[in-house]
Image (spheres, rainbow, N blue to C red):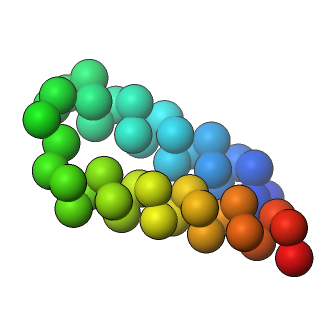
């Protein structure tokens, strides 16, 4: 599984969410941040 591709997909999802709904719920934003930070951590193992 390509970590970089997954992270890029998450970034695109986050951008799309902001475009569709500028008032993203804090829970959803936190979830995106958690997933992204987890993927970054995996890169540094």
| Residue occupying image coordinates x 72% and y 69% | 41
Please name whichever residue, 33 or 10, is drawn nearer the observer in this view of the structure: 33
Q: Residue 20 at x, y = what percent?
A: 19, 27
Please tell me which residue lies in front, 31 or 10.
31
Q: Quadrant of the N terminus?
A: bottom right
**How many numbered marks have been drawn onto this rendered protein structure?**
0
Above/below status of 35 relative to 4? below
Q: Is residue 24 left or right of residue 29?
A: left
Decide if residue 34 is on the left or right side of residue 16: right
| Residue 39 versus residue 6 in the image, above or below | below
Q: Is residue 19 above or below residue 42?
A: above
The percent coordinates of residue 7 (x first, y second) are 63, 50
Q: Give the residue at x 36% y 63%.
A: 31
Residue at 56 percent across and 44 percent down: it is 9
Residue 34 picture location, percent across and down: 47, 65
Q: Residue furthest top?
A: 19
Give coordinates of residue 17: x percent, y percent.
28, 36
Look at 18% across and 42% down and name the residue there.
Answer: 24
Left or right: 35 with respect to 16? right
For residue 37, which quarter of the picture?
A: bottom right
Q: For the C terminus, which image quadrant? A: bottom right
Q: Residue furthest right?
A: 45
């Amino acid at each position: 599984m390509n970590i970089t591709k997954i992270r890029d997909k998450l970034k695109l999802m986050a951008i799309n969410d902001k475009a569709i709904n500028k008032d993203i719920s804090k829970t959803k934003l936190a979830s995106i941040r958690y997933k992204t930070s987890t993927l970054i951590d995996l890169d540094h193992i």
